[in-house]
Amino acid sequence: MIWGALVGGLAGTLVLTTLLRAASEFGLTRMDLPFLLGTAVTADRVRAKAIGYALHFGFGLLFALGYYAIFLVIDRSGFLLGAFFGLVHAIFAGSALVNILLPVVHPRMGTGFTAAGSAPLLEPPGFLLLNYGRQTPLATIIAHIAYGAIVGGFVSLAN
C-alpha cells in the first residue's frame, strides 16, 4: 500500500538524517545534506538549513515512492530487500548523483574547473563524498541502508 511507503519514507528520512547529523557531530563527516540542498536555493546560510531540511524530507518521500514502484514491479518487499535498495541508493548517490551532478547544477558549489581566485564556493563532494571526510562513505551507506530497510519494512507491513 502506498501509505506504507509514505510513512516509511518519512520515518526512514528521519532516521537517515539523524544518523548523518550524529556522524557529523561525532566528527566522522563534514557533510550536511540539508545545508547542501538549501544552499542550491539561497545564499542565506540560516534559511538554507531550513529550506534544505524541507527539500531533504521531500526527496525522502519521493525516493520512498520510487522504492515502492520497484517493490510493486517485482512483487516483493521487506526489510532486507529495502536495505539492499538503500545500499544501491547510497553507492549511486555517492558516486554519480552527488559527486557528478550536484556540482554541475549547484550555483554555489565548486567543481574541478573552478579557479582558485573565484568567489567562495562550497567544496565539491568528490567521489563517494570523500572530500567531506574519510568516514563519510561509511556513514552515508549505513544511513541509506537503514532508510531502505525502514521503507521496505513499512511497505511490507502495509500489504
Image: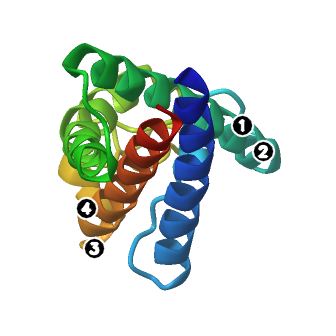
The reply to whether residue 101 is visible in this rendering is yes
Determine whether, in the image, residue 13 is placed left or right of residue 143: right
Give the number of the disc on residue 135. 3
Whether the residues at callouts 1 and 3 have beta carbons within 8 Å, the answer is no
- Residue hosting label 4: 137
Residue sitting at x 37%, y 31%: 103
Asked if 27 appears above or below 2 in the picture, the reply is: below
Asked if 13 appears above or below 60 in the picture, the reply is: below
- SS class of the residue under badge 4? helix
Whether the residues at callouts 2 and 4 have beta carbons within 8 Å, the answer is no
The reply to whether residue 39 is visible in this rendering is no
- Disc 2 to disc 1, C-alpha distance: 6 Å
- Disc 4 to disc 3, C-alpha distance: 6 Å
113, 14: nearer the viewer: 14
- Residue hosting label 1: 54
Whether the residues at callouts 2 and 1 have beta carbons within 8 Å, the answer is yes
Task: Decide which of tag 1 and tag 3 comes sooner along the chain.
Answer: 1
Task: Decide which of tag 2 and tag 4 comes sooner along the chain.
Answer: 2
> Given the image, on which type of amino acid does mark 4 rest?
Pro
- SS class of the residue under badge 2? helix
- Disc 4 to disc 1, C-alpha distance: 23 Å
Whether the residues at callouts 4 and 3 have beta carbons within 8 Å, the answer is yes
Residue sitting at x 62%, y 43%: 10
> Given the image, on which type of amino acid does mark 2 rest?
Ala
> Given the image, on which type of amino acid does mark 3 rest?
Gln
> Given the image, on which type of amino acid does mark 1 rest?
Ala
